[in-house]
């Protein structure tokens, strides 16, 4: 038999560092998605990685390490050294997310915020889960910042004056204490104020003439006054159970005591300068898409309707039962009368959603003579849990203007 051929052994597999083969600017971008602790630890991977973290385009200071919560006291020494050793390169994003926070930690966090501004950060996030961070009462001065997201912090007067931030376009505030009487920016396009509060005895004025989208949900305190927003396209306003602007004698028939001579303290409490102006509706009257929701006791929308503007651009409108509580449905009729180009109306009645038990689709056929219904209206939706007498009252009102419904 011929001698058996010896099989050649396969060459050893040599690991290829595909990430390490990427150019520096791409690795800096990859590192920007890591928490600062993890980004620094990449220095042990290889000689190539030794100093890459120093020029990362993002800085993420987070109070987590191997899924354990860390306080500011646990990490501030590390962060201080990191800021000293970093290259003096610009930052695209800075995130400061902390779960545990105490009053003694304020100087450290404020220093980190100022460092972000100094490094020309374009996006800054400050998120405090548990604690009271009071940001320095100094205005932000940055020609580069475009996005600012704040959560769980106290904001005082000069901080919310963004005159020195000409590039700022997005501002999101969640669960913040607002201690300023003005929020102003000539460049802001998107504003979100969610579950924030104010202890001020006056209304906060919002001056953002370039705004395109607005979200105002669950504000506690005197409802903010919205200045003219001529470029506004979309606004979502949901006035939660805010007792500062709630009628103390509101009855089950949808009548506010402000309509009577014996008005409660809240209903008659109108500051100088607001007695003949709208609080909300005037500022958002240019919007194309509106959602206007309110708890039943809130009187702000009802008071605004006495000086109701014309919603000359409004195409889609979402309302809840607040607008249908009055015996003659005057609030609903008023806003429809002042929305001449409205195309779609959605009524969300006594049902929070998003999944509603009953959905009715309606269509409108114009009829001869004057009508409270806009002539362009072609879609009417009514969403509810059950068709009870309260919903039937609304359907009867709409049917009187030649709107016919079908169940889905």
Image (spheres, rainbow, N blue to C red):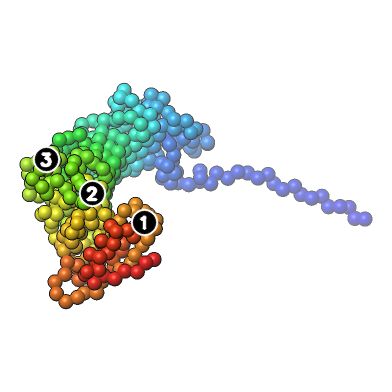
- In which quadrant of the rendered view does residue 262 lie? top left
Q: Residue at x 76, y 49 (%)?
A: 8
Circle number at residue 252: 2
In the displayed structure, would residue 360 be above or below residue 77? Answer: below
Do callouts 2 and 1 mark residues in contact (Cβ within 8 Å)?
no
Q: Residues within 10 Å of mark 2 (few under 14, many from 20)?
A: few
Residue 193 located left or right of residue 79: left
Q: Which residue is mark 3?
A: 269
Q: From mark 2 to mark 1, how far is it between C-alphas?
A: 19 Å
In the displayed structure, would residue 111 be above or below residue 141? Answer: above
Q: Residues within 10 Å of mark 3 (few under 14, many from 20)?
A: few
Q: Which residue is mark 1?
A: 385
- In which quadrant of the rendered view does residue 346 lie? bottom left
In percent of width and height, residue 22 lies at 48, 47
Mark 2 lies on a secondary structure that is loop
Look at discs 2 and 3 and give the one toward the viewer. 2
Q: Residue at x 89, y 52 (%)?
A: 3
């Amino acid at each position: 038999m011929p001698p058996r051929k010896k099989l050649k052994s396969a060459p050893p597999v040599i690991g290829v560092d595909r990430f390490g083969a990427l150019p520096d600017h791409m690795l800096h971008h990859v590192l920007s998605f890591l928490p600062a602790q993890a980004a620094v630890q990449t220095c042990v991977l290889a000689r190539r990685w030794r100093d890459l973290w120093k020029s990362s385009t993002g800085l993420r200071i987070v109070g987590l390490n191997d899924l354990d919560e860390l306080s500011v006291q646990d990490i501030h020494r590390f962060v201080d050294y990191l800021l000293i050793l970093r290259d003096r390169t610009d930052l695209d994003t800075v995130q400061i997310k902390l779960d545990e926070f105490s009053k003694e930690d304020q100087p450290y966090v404020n220093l980190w915020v100022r460092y972000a501004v100094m490094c020309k950060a374009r996006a800054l996030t400050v998120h405090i889960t548990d604690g009271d961070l009071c940001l320095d009462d100094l205005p932000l001065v940055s020609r580069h910042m475009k996005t600012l997201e704040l959560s769980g912090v106290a904001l005082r007067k000069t901080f919310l004056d963004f005159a020195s931030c000409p590039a700022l376009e997005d501002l999101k505030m969640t669960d913040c204490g607002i201690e300023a009487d003005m929020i102003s920016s000539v460049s802001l396009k998107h504003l979100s104020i969610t579950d924030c509060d104010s202890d001020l005895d006056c209304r906060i004025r919002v001056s953002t003439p370039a705004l395109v989208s607005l979200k105002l949900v669950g504000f506690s305190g005197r409802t903010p006054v919205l200045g003219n927003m001529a470029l506004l396209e979309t606004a979502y306003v949901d006035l939660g159970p805010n007792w500062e602007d709630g009628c103390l004698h509101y009855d089950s028939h949808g009548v506010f005591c402000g309509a009577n001579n014996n008005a409660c303290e809240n209903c008659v409490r109108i500051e100088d300068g607001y007695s003949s102006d709208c609080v909300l509706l005037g500022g958002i009257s240019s919007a194309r898409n509106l959602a206007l929701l309110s708890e039943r006791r809130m009187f702000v929308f009802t008071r605004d309707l006495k000086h109701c503007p014309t919603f000359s651009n409004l195409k889609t409108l979402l309302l809840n039962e607040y607008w249908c509580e009055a015996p003659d449905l005057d609030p609903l009729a008023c806003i429809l009368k002042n929305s001449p180009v409205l195309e779609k109306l959605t009524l969300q009645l006594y049902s929070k959603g998003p999944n509603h038990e009953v959905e009715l689709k309606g269509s409108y056929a114009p009829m001869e003579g004057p009508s409270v219904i806009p002539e362009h209206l072609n879609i009417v939706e009514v969403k509810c849990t059950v068709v009870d007498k309260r919903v039937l009252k609304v359907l009867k009102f709409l049917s009187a203007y030649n709107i016919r419904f079908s169940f889905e």
